[in-house]
Image: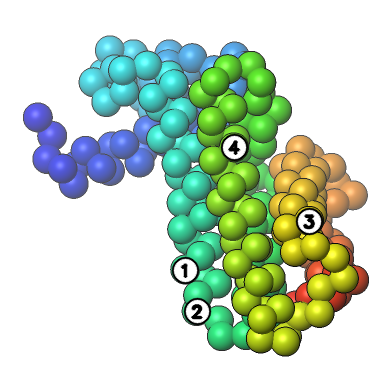
Amino acid sequence: MARPSTQAKRRNDLIQATLAAAAERGLRELSMTDVAREAGLTRGALLYYYEDLDALLVEAHDAGNQRIGDQRDALVMKERSPGRQLRVAIDAGLPNGPDDALMRLLYEFDILAGNSKLHDYLVERMYQRQLAVYAEILSSGTASGDFSPTGDLHDIAMNFVALEDAYGLHIVGGNKLMTVQAARRAIYLFAEQAGCPVGPE
């Protein structure tokens, strides 16, 4: 049996293979065989680590939860002012660019929501993490007087998530008219209009 460190590396490699295969095939057509081929393994060898495709996809989605949730939370907590926290949260929530395979996979889960309980669960869990980041920053900034929200805080937080998702989908979907920089600028503008301006760079 592989050592824990070796297993962890292998699982990470398999997640990367899943992202690459999903980017090429799409979630609807993705199979364990596709992932095994991308990883340079047999399907049987892949089954040693994951019992089925759903188990593999859950772990791939967990990687997204780590990035959009835990890693973003850590970046936000490094900042003291709510405005800076909001800027960091917006920046960290967008794709790195059109070739961001992990973000592309997450958006595909969104598209497939309603087709299975697994997809519904994963999409709802991700949404709650996104919403929580913004809700906490907005609440803190309002309490400190840094923000003067022009509407209900929950609604403003929902709009941040909606903009993050909408612009992100355009970016990874290949819309050449939408860049990461343009998306950031537009969400910063919404923040100012909502009475919650982002802090300086």
What residue is pinned by disc 3?
155
**What amino acid is found at the position of numbered circle 4 in the picture?**
Glu
* Residue at 34%, 13% in the rendered image: 43
Whether pointer 1 and pointer 2 mark residues with C-beta atoms closer than 8 Å, the reply is: yes
Residue hosting label 2: 78
Tell me how far mark 3 sits from mark 2, CA to CA: 26 Å
Q: Residues within 10 Å of mark 2 (few under 14, many from 20)?
A: few
Q: Residue at x 65, y 71 (%)?
A: 139
Determine the image quadrant of residue 198.
Answer: bottom right
Which x, y percent locates residue 81?
62, 85
In front here: 135 or 56?
Answer: 135
Mark with earlier residue (3, 4): 4
Q: Amino acid at mark 3?
A: Asp
For residue 45, what is the image quadrant? top left
Residue 74: give its label: 1
Of mark 4 and mark 1, the one earlier in the sequence is 1
Q: Would residue 92 be found to the left or right of residue 118 on screen?
A: right
Which label sits on residue 124?
4
Q: Amino acid at mark 2?
A: Lys
Q: Earlier in the sequence, mark 1 or mark 3?
A: 1
Which amino acid type is marked by label 1?
Ala
Q: Quadrant of the N terminus?
A: top left
| Distance from the alpha carbon under mark 4 to that under mark 2 | 27 Å
> What secondary structure is marked by label 2?
loop
Q: Is residue 161 visible?
A: yes
Report x, y in % for residue 59: 41, 35
